[in-house]
């Protein structure tokens, strides 16, 4: 979901449960999407990515789903652990993925705060 | 495996002073980026660099200067710090063929 002002959307789950974090992206022309995890006091950490020609990609305990029809991205975390507590950002790349100059733009969503209760 | 490092991790300075934030990466990534992160604004791109001696402005470049004489280093200088530049600064890098950027641990800057 989207944040309003300074407040991040939050998700609170019990340890061991599955978590689903949602993100709506803005540009239907975006070709590439990334999920980042940011723990308190640290930099964003790459989790998983997906290209627009895919609708699902799995990693270790994580799955990303892409629905281009409604411009929606989700991150599923299986068997959520206390160490998963963090802010999760989706990001979309507009322009050329294999670039980093003026033809490339990485746009971050506002983030969702995941809290895992032991 | 150092990856991407930033220094200092914390800095307190006064209005009008010059401050340089350092970024060093060991991956030989071509592209490097500087972002600032503020509540309510998320991550905003300040400057980026495609290679040594090639830099360009991002979304919020005013008040900042960058240089890149070597591929592995990308320092960010605040020429005359202002209170509005109090923020957390992140450096990131990426390879040419990949989309994802990889971030450093950040520098927390307080301008009094």
Image (tube, coloured by chain):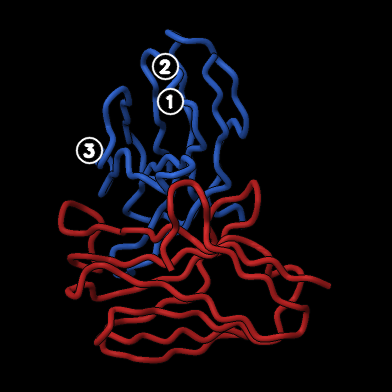
Chain colours: A red, B blue
Q: Chain of mark 2?
A: B
Direction from residue A42 to residue A70 in the image, left or right: left
Chain letter for mark 3 = B
- Residue furthest to the right: A118
Q: Of A107 and A101, which appears nearest the observer?
A: A107
Instruction: Compute the Cα span from label 2 to label 3.
Output: 19 Å
**Residues at circles 2 and 1 in contact by the CB criterion of under 8 Å:** yes
Q: Which residue is mark 3?
A: B57
Q: Secondary structure at mark 1?
A: helix
Q: Dot 3: within a 10 Å radius of its alpha carbon, few (fewer than 14), some, or many (20 or more) residues?
A: some
Residue drawn 49% across the image and 42% down it: B39
Rendered position, B33 above or below A17: above
Residue shown at 61% from the left, 82% from the top: A77
Tell me the quarter of the image containing the N terminus of chain A.
bottom left
SS label for mark 2: loop
Disc nearest the viewer among 2 and 3: 2
Q: Quadrant of residue B57?
A: top left
Q: Badge 1 is on which residue?
A: B85
Residue A85 horizontal/vertical position (percent): 68, 65
């Amino acid at each position: 979901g989207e944040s309003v002002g300074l407040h991040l959307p939050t998700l609170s789950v019990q340890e061991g449960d599955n978590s689903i974090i949602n993100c709506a992206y803005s540009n239907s022309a975006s070709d590439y999407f990334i999920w980042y995890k940011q723990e308190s006091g640290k930099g964003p950490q790459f989790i998983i990515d997906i290209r627009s020609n895919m609708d699902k990609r799995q990693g270790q305990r994580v799955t990303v789903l892409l629905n281009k029809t409604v411009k929606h991205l989700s991150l599923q975390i299986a068997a959520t652990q206390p160490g998963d507590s963090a802010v999760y950002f989706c990001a979309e790349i507009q322009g050329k993925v294999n670039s980093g100059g003026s033809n490339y733009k990485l746009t971050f969503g506002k983030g969702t705060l995941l809290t895992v209760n032991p | 495996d150092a990856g991407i490092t930033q220094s200092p991790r914390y800095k307190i300075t006064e209005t009008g002073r010059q401050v340089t934030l350092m970024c060093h990466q060991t991956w030989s990534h071509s592209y490097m980026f500087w972002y600032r992160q503020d509540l309510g604004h998320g991550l905003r791109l300040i400057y980026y660099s495609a290679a040594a001696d090639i830099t360009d402005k991002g979304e919020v470049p005013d008040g900042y200067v960058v240089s890149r004489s070597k591929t592995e280093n990308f320092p960010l200088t605040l020429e005359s710090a202002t209170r509005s530049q109090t923020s957390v600064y992140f450096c990131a890098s990426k390879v040419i063929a990949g989309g994802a950027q990889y971030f450093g641990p950040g520098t927390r800057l307080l301008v009094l």
